[in-house]
Amino acid sequence: MPVSSHDRDRVVPLRPRRPRGLAALLAALVASLLTGCQATLFAGLNATARDGGVVATRNVEFDPMHALALDVYRPADAHGAPVVVFFYGGSWKSGKRQWYRWAGEALARRGLVVVIPDYRKWPQVRMGGFMRDAANAVAWAHAHAGDYGGDPDALFVMGHSAGAHLGALLATDGRWLHGVGMHRSQLRGFIGLAGPYDFLPLTDPDFIDMFGHDHAEQLASQPVHFVDGHAPPMLLLQGTDDDLVAPRNASALGDAVRRAGGSATVDMIPDVGHVTLLLAMSRPLRGRAPVLDQVSGFIRAHAERSARLAMAASARVR
């Protein structure tokens, strides 16, 4: 995965289509999600996951005040592995970390320590609440990475849909990590799957209540508004058939980052929709799009680059 600051939008070729039975499974899974049967969908995906070689530590409380917990998935032999905090989606209104065991195990099998936290949602909280929860989860991952065989200096954030929005704001608006004693420079990269990054104007009353009633308030919810050339490298994956989050969101953020002198790769995946992009990490649908390969390649490349730079800086000091 390239690490140049001059990355451009790319169209990723699809892998050969799987047999017709797999297409039917995909349709059934997507239908389950779109009709509100998320628990059924994710229970099915969790049943397909293989946990051999992956160690799971569940129900770790990272915010006792709000009774928030997280799950950690790691290779059995993890030592100095890159760490990725994955934020799930759900329109900032729904979702549970337990639904994403299949995703944690899939990423852990690529040699990563994976942290999947819960966060409070609307209407219990508005944007400030779920962003503080996200920042607290990243701070916990940084502080405890070594306890799980991870490298705190190889820390990444990742998310799908609303979860990608959380990760993108952590990467662009420095106040959130500053509030937990961290800095954006401690993130080695951000991976966004079908994320909303540039979605004004707001018309849905729920989102207006969530993000603010006036334009100034709403601007604070837009990752593109905070791009300043100091964000970590980004991998923005987007399906061209996404009818929930417009593909222009990924293009807008990628263009803004590159104009500011940063590094952003935007991969447009043909004939892939909003849900399919996420489900392509699951065992049944892995052939639908090369999401796992792209994510693990990006993380490895930037973790190794960071390690080389740290070694060079140490050598200069000596």
Image (tube, rainbow, N blue to C red):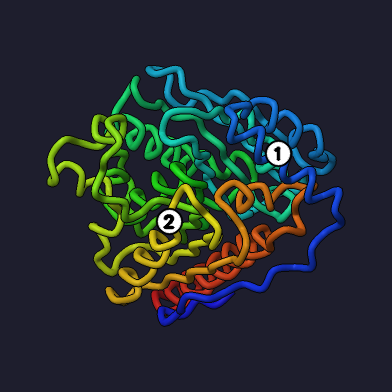
| Residue type of the residue flagged with mark 1 | Leu
Name which residue lies at 16% across and 35% down.
213
Callout count: 2
Position of the C terminus by quadrant: bottom left
Q: Nearer the viewer, residue 295 or 142?
A: 295
Viewer-nearest residue: 259 or 218? 218
Find residue 231 and report its image quarter: bottom left
Residue 247 place in picture, x, y as percent: 45, 61
Label 1 Cα crowd, 10 Å radius (few <14 / some 14-19 / many 20+): many
Residue 156 shows up from this direction: no
Left or right: 206 with respect to 63? left
In the rendered view, would you say 318 is above or below 38?
below
Quarter of the image where one finds residue 63: top left
- Tell me the residue that label 1 is attached to: 29
x 35%, y 72%: residue: 255
Q: Residue at x 72, y 44 (%)?
A: 27
Q: Secondary structure at mark 2?
A: loop
Determine crowd level at label 2: few under 14, some 14-19, many 20+ residues with C-alpha closer than 10 A: many
Residue ID for mark 2:
246
